[in-house]
Amino acid sequence: MADSAHSGSGGAPGREDGDDRLLAALRASESRFRAAFCDAVIGMALIDPEDRIIEVNPAFAALIGRGVGELVRTHLHEIIDPEGMPPRLFTALVHGQRERFRVEKPLKHREGHTVWSKVTVSLIRDPAGQPLYTLALVEDMTEQRRLGDRLEYQALHDPLTRLPNRTFFFERLDAACLPGTEDRGNRGGSGRPVAVAEERRVGVCYLDLDGFAAINETLGHHIGDELLIAVATRLRRGLSERDAHLVARMGGDEFAVLVTDSVGSEQLTALAGRILEVLERPFDVAGHRLVVTASIGVVERSVHETTPTDLVKDADSTLYWSKADGRARWTLYDPDRGAHQLTRQLLATALRPALERGEFTIEYQPLVGLADGAVHGAEALVRWRHPRYGTLSPDRFIPLAEESGAIVPLGKWVLEESCRQARQWLTEFPDTETFVSVNLAARQIWDSDVVADVARALDSAGLPARLLQLEITESALLGPGGRPLQALQALADMGVRIAIDDFGTGYSNLAYLSRLPVHVLKLDGTFIEGFRDPAPPTAGHSAAAAVGGGGGSGASGASSATSSAASPATSSAPAERPALPELHSRRRDADEQIVGAMVQLAHTLGLTVTAEGIESAAQAERLRLTGCDTAQGWYFARPGEAELVAAILRKGRPASSHR
């Protein structure tokens, strides 16, 4: 019993000891929490259900430049802007439906600047599990935000000129072309509100500095960079600050000006004119006074008619039209010219595959001796049997082939086929020794071993070198560098005949002729125009000329146009009519004297002369009287298949030569 009593009397002190230990533990826990709360390096704040601050730690107060005491009972919205807070998440939190959420928010610093922070808001419950207050953990993200902003700026701006770059330009252009009726908060240079997608328009001025590469090459890239900075500054001050247009550097010396919500092409062409004016004044760069012009491509159209990619592509194409038209100007996009350019591109792309598919063929035009009327040779003229565009003449694709380099395999094929055909003529007509004349592009000399190619073609066909004539224009022959001359000399040493094509239209360095490995001069057709009948055409004669012009070689059309323009019916001064025959006569006499002099010079140098574009018996006779050796043209025969030449050789001479 005593023991029992003693035991019972000791129960109360035991409970007291337990309560003391619990209280001590709570105090220790609170002390640890307060130490963690006060010493934490991130900001912490306890907030009551009315969004007022109960307590903050020093890190939070320092973050916004305030004291701990002055923040107590401060409403949270005085520190954190409520705009952008997720209301649904916050409501769910304070009602106990959510434990925490995280958001990035700007805080208001005492000195007025913004402190970007990552805010984590957690719910604190009472012992019954009901929402009691919230705890906000605030981490300073300002430096990270600044770093992100710097990286974004660098990603969207050109490091040299500080202008928006190509990526930024396309982002703005994409936004301008988006469908919809919402106000994007971006009024264009016109200041008008955003319109319905079908009514909205957009425009681009795409510009490139003329001759910038020469500045880089002569003065150095550092001067070029300084010039780009100066140009960018002028464009930004003259356009961006004045009209709020986006000016971007697209790369190299190319810039673009974007006009959102444009009001028509007139606005864009006026802007292009202003760009040219902005760049008119010389630039003073590192002690150099530099004059810079620009070529500008202008495109303006409805948003629903285009895509950003097509818009910039067309602007870039138009820019190069502007350069081709003479530089220092703007050019407005022309759909017809664009379609023509697209066709050129399609043809250029299809050239090499077309050669592999066998779409090319060769026609031959006889070269006739003016003294005997016999066929001495034939010029090989390549044609493209295009499956979509029909038969294309050389002027449609040869320039493209020269630009793309396809002229090398194409020229090699023409050479081989022509040599084989000449060998067939030699086999069938051994006494005539009809030669074949093949055009040779300058790029074939530069980009391939043309001497080896010719040797292989002759050997493969079994054709004597004397029956091959190669034609090259005088501009290519007399251009810079010695390689063409070395190659042609080697070909001449092989026995191949060398002809200068279109003589009189290029350098015409007559003194140089004696040192060239040349055998033949081919006079350009423009010299032959004056050999036509100079009499004023009657109505019947004009009709006949029109019929003849439809089957001529090109000179006939020019002649009939000239005759029509000079017809007495178009003049209002009767007294001047007699002067027209005299003008024709003087031109005829001058052309005959020029041709006669060139023929005499050529013969003195041991060369023969061929005239192109002969369309009448009168022309042929007058040329014969000058001493011209051979001629070609529709008067003798139009270009045709190889059998055409064979048929003439069987007859002995072209039928037209008897007229």
Image (cartoon, rainbow, N blue to C red):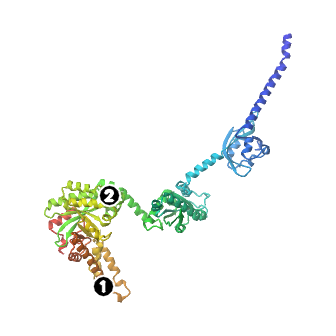
> Residue extending furthest top?
1
Mark in front: 1 vs 2: 2
Residue type for callout 1:
Glu
Q: Residue at x 23, y 67 (%)?
A: 520
Pointers 1 and 2 in contact (C-beta within 8 Å): no
Position above or below: 570 against 149: below
Q: Quadrant of the C terminus?
A: bottom left
Residue type for callout 2:
Trp
Quadrant position of residue 353? bottom left
- Near mark 1 (Cα within 10 A), the count class, few <14, some 14-19 or many ≥20, is few
Quadrant position of residue 634? bottom left
Q: Which mark is residue 133?
A: none
Q: Which mark is residue 446?
A: 2
Q: Is residue 547 visible?
A: no
Q: Is residue 373 left or right of residue 564?
A: left
The one nearer the camera, 449 or 129, is 449
Could you tell me which secondary element the residue under label 1 belongs to? Answer: helix
Could you tell me which secondary element the residue under label 2 belongs to? Answer: helix
Q: Position of residue 67 (x, y in %)?
A: 77, 45
Q: Position of residue 105 (x, y in %)?
A: 67, 47
Query: Where is mark 1, residue-wise?
Result: 582
